[in-house]
Image (cartoon, grey):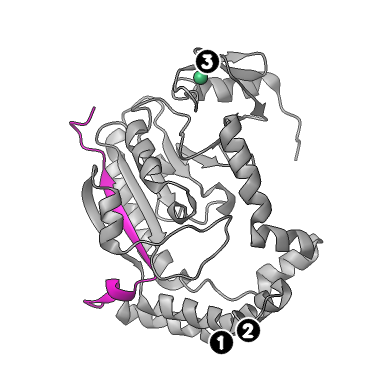
Amino acid sequence: MSHVVDSAQCTSAVSGLLPALACPTCRAPLAAQGGSLVCTKCQHHYSVVGDVPVLLDAASKAEIAGFRSDAENVRLRQQLGSRGVARLVDIIRPPHPFAFTRRRVNHAKRIAFSQLAAASEGNASPRFLDIGSGILGGLNHSGLSAHVRSNLLPLEIAPTSGVGVVGDAHKLPFRDGSLDGALIQGVMEHVRDPFLVVAEIFRTLKPGAPVFAEVPFIQHYHLDPVDYRRWTHYGFEQLFANFTCDDAGVAAGPASALTDMLTEFPALLFKSPALYWSTKLISGWLFSPIQLLDAVWGGAPRAHVMAGAVYFLGRKPAEAA
Ligand SMILES: [Zn+2]
């Protein structure tokens, strides 16, 4: 595959995005200037890597550089070194403790999100922001309609493959009311100020545009790249209080949470990353079948009491400015 970037093509991809983009610092429109973007108000310059605008200010860059170097799984990947070893680990590692219910429920909720998003089918250049799941390479996309998939804009904190825009969720680099929908899955526990992130989603969505969000409730602490908090199902609904709620509830059931706790428990004894991760490899396979009990417990009347993850599906009110 060619890695040569055609400059005319690069310009057209970025200029297609330009009407929606804004300076992350002062929210003013951006203008193309040579190979970079410049803020029309504060004059700050932003680089474009390939076709990906890197819209981070100095404060965001410093924060991201700090916690990326701390991420334990990133460091372990580096220690594993060769791609062969990393691939072997990918093959032999057990299914994620939430794989069974979370995948099933989220698939259904993404179908529901797509139905709400169908209202934007007539819009000129619709845009659906996928906040923070760029690195998963589409793992969080099952159930999305062709309309949503073909207009998906993955936002990440670094220009890795599959990313559309590099930005900080606390300072979304988009204009007010410029987006037709937003997805944020398994991300909110990793942001410093979730209230600010939700306010940014609210600001950038068009009135009536849908949001689908999912977070862990009972899940072990995971550095990916940094882990700050958990939500109950009511707590998560509260976070989205300014939105109209279409649906909210349990994304991963109690059996998923139990599988996760049992997998983690024996590995806690080990400080060494090698011993910690290899113990999890064994306990993960040993306890993984337990998550299948969520075929029953996932729909239990009190499933929310020890759910592994919760979700919110809603819309920015149509009358919102
Ligand atoms: Zn600016």
**Residue 296 locus on image (x, y percent):** 31, 81
Question: What residue sits 48% from the left and 79% below the top?
Answer: 261
- Which three-letter amino acid code belongs to the residue tagged 3? Cys
Q: How crowded is mark 1: few (under 14 residues within 10 Å), some or many (20 or more)?
A: some
Of pointers 3 and 1, the one earlier in the residue sequence: 3
Q: Name the residue under label 1.
A: 286
Question: What residue sits 68% from the left and 57% below the top?
Answer: 74
Q: Is residue 303 magenta?
A: yes
The reply to whether the C-beta atoms of the residues labelled 1 and 2 are less than 8 Å apart is yes
Q: Name the residue under label 2.
A: 282
Question: What residue sits 57% from the left and 34% below the top?
Answer: 59
The stretch in magenta equals 300-321
The reply to whether the C-beta atoms of the residues labelled 3 and 1 are less than 8 Å apart is no
- Which three-letter amino acid code belongs to the residue tagged 1? Leu
**The CB of the residue at mark 3 lies under 8 Å from ligand 1:** yes
Q: How far apart are marks 3 and 2 (CA)?
A: 54 Å
Q: Is residue 249 visible?
A: no
Is disc 1 placed on a helix, strand or loop? helix
Q: How crowded is mark 2: few (under 14 residues within 10 Å), some or many (20 or more)?
A: some
* Above or below for 6 versus 308: above
Is disc 3 placed on a helix, strand or loop? loop
Query: Within the image, what quadrant is residue 57 found in?
Result: top right
5 or 280: nearer the eye? 280
238 or 4: nearer the eye? 238
- Which three-letter amino acid code belongs to the residue tagged 2? Ile
* Above or below for 37 versus 149: above
Q: How crowded is mark 3: few (under 14 residues within 10 Å), some or many (20 or more)?
A: few
Q: Name the residue under label 3.
A: 42
Q: Distance between the residues labelled 3 and 1?
A: 56 Å
